[in-house]
Image: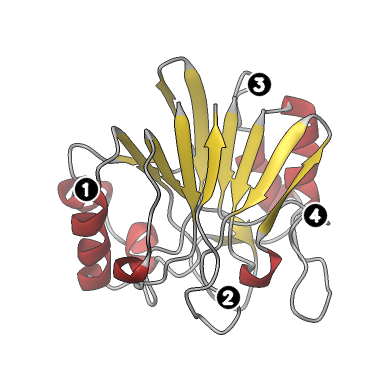
Amino acid sequence: MRLVLISDTHGYHNKLVLPEGDMLIHAGDVSSRGHLTEVKSFLEWYSNLDFKYKIFIAGNHDFFFERAEQEEIQSVIPENVIYLNDSFTEIEGIKIWGSPISPWFFDWAFNRHRGAAIKKHWDLIPEDSDIVVTHGPVYNILDKTIRGEPVGCKDLLKAIRKVQPRLHLCGHIHEAYGSELKYETHFINASVLDVGYNMKHPPVVVDW
């Protein structure tokens, strides 16, 4: 199974060149301001891509998914696309859990204060997860801003170290794109845009 991993397209999805693969996972920020028109544009593009499985979560820019009723959200999700929101799916034996939540940053979507408010989301991660997808990174791994400040979530790091998924996928901090193997987990920040919102980083390919 070849996985293609991306994040933070912010409405520039049409500029992205994707390699061939079996499963495509997007780690959030599919839009710029979270308007329905932006979301629909992304979903039309995403649903027509030539991947057997297509999974995504929302991010802190994707206000539509936070503000809309569940019925409206489901009405715009194509049948061949899987949307995860503190939820789980299993594909060919690969157990995948995803969440749009990230630590509080100004007044964006799916923000939670550090500590108990955010920890309760990470407590939902099943202990047998193979892949965990969150919009934001864990603390001190692929989370440094352009100023060199680590802004990831310490509680998420604790949860990942407890669960030990084979792969943790995130985005959010564009300039922290990359991968790192630590604590028995392959951490990947797959932000395809750089800090200036230019299409710079290639999708990450993982052979499962």
The alpha-carbon separation of the residues under discs 1 and 3 comes to 30 Å
Q: Foreground residue, 124 or 134? A: 134
The alpha-carbon separation of the residues under discs 1 and 2 comes to 25 Å
Q: Please identify, in this view, whether the residue under mark 4 or under mark 1 is nearer the observer.
A: 1
Q: Is residue 14 left or right of residue 124?
A: left
Q: Please identify, in this view, whether the residue under mark 2 or under mark 3 is nearer the observer.
A: 2
Q: Is residue 76 above or below residue 64?
A: above
SS assignment at label 1: helix
**Image location (x, y in percent) of residue 87:** 46, 34
**Are there few (<14), some (14-19), or many (20+) residues within 10 Å of tag 1?**
some
Q: Which mark is residue 139?
A: 4
Q: Look at the image and name its color scheme.
A: secondary structure
State yes or no: discs 1 and 2 in contact (Cβ < 8 Å).
no
State yes or no: discs 4 and 2 in contact (Cβ < 8 Å).
no
Q: Which mark is residue 127?
A: 3
User: Residue type at mark 3?
Assistant: Glu
The quarter of the image holding the N terminus is top left
Q: Is residue 24 left or right of residue 68?
A: right
- Determine which residue is flagged by label 1: 47
**Are there few (<14), some (14-19), or many (20+) residues within 10 Å of tag 2?**
some
**Are there few (<14), some (14-19), or many (20+) residues within 10 Å of tag 3?**
few
**Image location (x, y in percent) of residue 13:** 34, 66
Q: Is residue 205 left or right of residue 58?
A: right
